[in-house]
Image: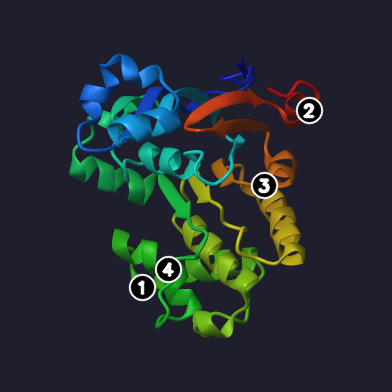
Amino acid sequence: MKNNASSPNGEVCIEVNELWKIFGHNPKQLLHSEMRSATKADILEKTGHVIAARDISFNVNQGELFVIMGLSGSGKSTLIRCILRLIEPTRGKILINGNDVCSYDESQLIDLRRHTTSMVFQHFGLFPHRSVIDNVAYGLKVRGVAKEERYARARKVIARVGLQGWENYPPSALSGGMQQRVGLARALATDPEILLMDEPFSGLDPLIRRQMQDELLDLQAEVQKTILFVTHDLHEALKLGNRIAIMRDGEIIQIGTPEEVITTPS
């Protein structure tokens, strides 16, 4: 595997070491058996288990836009959820700013998800009966931020994503691209250090998708967040990523810059 797992510049923000995720009735037993080195298809056929992530290690630096690219079923969405323990890893270590997320109790996980990270989903995840501004301000409300302050911060980030004037509309009045901007604004409103974006543009038509990619790059140049971005689209990965991890059948088969992925493919 061609693997530039650590970028030479910047301080490490996210570190994943030897991560496994196995779905099935007895994943620990499989992990300690010789079958774990078999192909994903053979393991499924003979044991009924699914290897979603196999011995994955990589680092993401502060301020880096790191893309995880793979086809459907490659394990990329499972991986990004394991990082926040929305799905529990079978084995491995996940460090965020040097802290072992796998050792966190429930209150520490809630604090991590509320104050350090935000997630943007493919299907927006908006509250249909709340206005744009109430959707964007929701994370601040959960934090206990006073109404006047959270609305002021929400208006600021709504303007940043180009939706000024739409604050009081319901999501149903907006196009798909506009709804995804609301999702991005909601993620940014809490000023998280880390953004995790799971196929955020895949449901949009090609023209709007390219526009959203451009807007994300412009926004990243301004805010310099650490972004972990999941996609099945190689062109999108090459356009957005400072580095790209390519996944296949639960494994990372290559990590490199866009140029390295093109010139020396795995």
Quarter of the image for the C terminus: give it.
top right
Q: Nearer the viewer, mark 4 or mark 1?
A: 4
Q: Amino acid at mark 1?
A: Lys
**Are there few (<14), some (14-19), or many (20+) residues within 10 Å of tag 1?**
few
* Residue kind at label 3, given as amino acid type: Asp
Q: Is residue 70 above or below residue 138?
A: above
Question: Which secondary structure, mark 3?
Answer: loop
Q: Is residue 50 left or right of residue 176?
A: left
Q: CA distance from mark 3 to mark 2?
A: 16 Å
- Residue 251 placed where, x, y %? 50, 27
Of marks 1 and 3, which one's residue comes earlier in the chain? Answer: 1
Q: Is residue 217 above or below residue 65?
A: below
Q: Amino acid at mark 2?
A: Glu
Residue 70 or residue 8, whichever sits in front: 70
Locate the N terminus by quadrant. top right
The image shows residue 78 at horizontal and vertical percentages of 41, 42
Q: Residue at x 41, y 80 (%)?
A: 130
Viewer-side label of 2, 1: 2
Tags 1 and 3 touching, CB below 8 Å: no
Regarding mark 4 in the picture, which secondary structure is present there? Answer: helix
From the top left corner, tell me how far across and down residue 128 is, in percent.
42, 79
Q: State the mark number for residue 147.
A: 1
The disc label shown at residue 259, or none: 2
Instruction: Report crowding for label 2: few under 14, some 14 to 19, many 20 or more residues within 10 A (C-alpha).
Output: few
Q: Nearer the viewer, mark 4 or mark 3?
A: 3
Separation (CA) of disc 1 from disc 3? 40 Å
Sequence order check, earlier mark of 3 and 2 = 3
Disc 4 or 3, which lies upstream in sequence? 4
Q: Which residue is mark 4?
A: 137
Location of residue 148 by image quarter: bottom left
Q: In front: mark 4 or mark 2?
A: 2
Q: Identify the residue under disc 3.
A: 233
